[in-house]
Amino acid sequence: MMEESEVKQTFWSEHRFMLLIGLVIVISIVLTIISMFIYTSSGAEQLDLSRPGYISATDEIDDNDKVTEYSSTGAVNADTIKEFQKLYNAQVDSNAKVDAFGGDPLNPDVLEASADSTTD
Amino acid sequence: MKLALPILTLVIFAAVIFVSTNAHASLTPEQIKNIQNNCTNIKTSLGQLQIADARLRVNRGQFYESLASKLMDSFNSRLSSNKIDSSSLVAITSTFRSEIDTFRADYSSYAQQLSTTIGINCQTKPESFQDSLLSTRDKRTKVHQDVLALNQSIIDYKNSVDTFATNFGQVKPTGNQ
């Protein structure tokens, strides 16, 4: 009995560093899989323009937030309402200029026609 | 005789499943040939659209979030802290925020479908490719409708603020003036 116990202790003491390394690798793999799952399922992946193939898109991202913040504190009077309207209407006008996701670029006829013109 | 009805039901059920799993957009041989011949160029166009739409999604998303937090919420808070009724503006802001969530979810669904479409080999599976393309097109149309709904809320908020400004003289605030 004593001999067996001594053999076991020797085994653990000899390999515990390797076990530690192995455990760390397993934990890091599990955490990486979980984080990749969250990255994909949360939709963060679609906003990540640093992905391969999307680098060119980052050049045209509006880095500067063009919406000027309106103070949430202070009095409400004709001047402060006018100030808000000025800030807000500027954004309404800029938004009106963008027809986001409009058109029909996925119409098979349009796609084939554009493909034809590319071939030509 | 007793087994006839269950067997008939089973056959109809199997037929429905077979038809639904093999249902493809009906393409003429000429259309199939067109897709196969232009496969590479169509995929290039889809790839360019994928990048352009990803960029648009980021820019629009930032804009809508900023508009809601920096302008709508701030103005609502200011009215509220001055004890002025802002319930109509708060309601529009709430609608706007839920529309942003819908836009986000629908774009996600569209982007995944577009990736799936690009992944289909249009030379060997032109019909599957066409099915997936049409599905992607529908999802993009849905995203566009979400954008139109968001734009409408932005206009609604503006109109409400204009009405509020016009009637402001008649409103008697009880807060610090």
Image (cartoon, coloured by chain):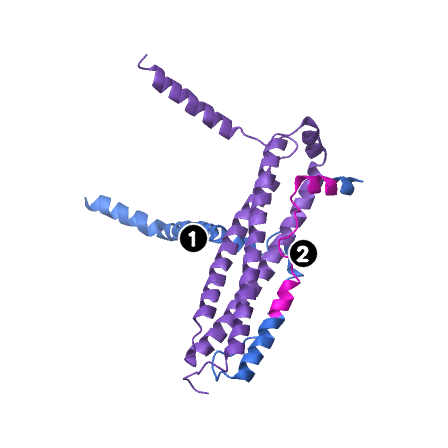
Chain colours: A blue, B purple
Per the rendering, the mark at residue A56 is: 2
Disc 2 element: helix
**Looking at the picture, which amino acid does disc 2 mark?**
Ser
Q: Residue at x 50, y 26 (%)?
A: B19
Depth order, front residue of A56/A94: A94
Please indicate, yes or no, whether residue A118 appears anywhere in the rendered image. yes
Per the image, is A99 magenta?
Answer: yes
Q: Earlier in the sequence, mark 1 or mark 2?
A: 1
Distance Cα–Cα, label 1 vs label 2:
30 Å
Left or right: B37 in relation to B133: right
Q: Which residues are magenta?
A: A91-115
Q: Which mark is residue A71?
A: none
Chain of the residue under the numbered disc 1 shown in the image:
A
Residue that lies at the very extreme toward the top in this rendered image: B1
What residue is shown at x 53% (from left), y 53% (from top)?
A45
Where residue B88 appears, x then y in whole percent?
46, 69
- Residue, far right: A120
Which disc is residue A31 wearing? 1
* Neighbour tally class for label 1: few under 14, some 14-19, many 20 plus, Cα within 10 Å: few
Q: Position of residue B107 (x, y in %)?
A: 54, 52
Q: Nearer the viewer, mark 1 or mark 2?
A: 2
Q: Are marks 1 and 2 in contact (CB under 8 Å)?
A: no
Q: Position of residue A74 (x, y in %)?
A: 48, 84
Q: Residue at x 66, y 63 (%)?
A: A97
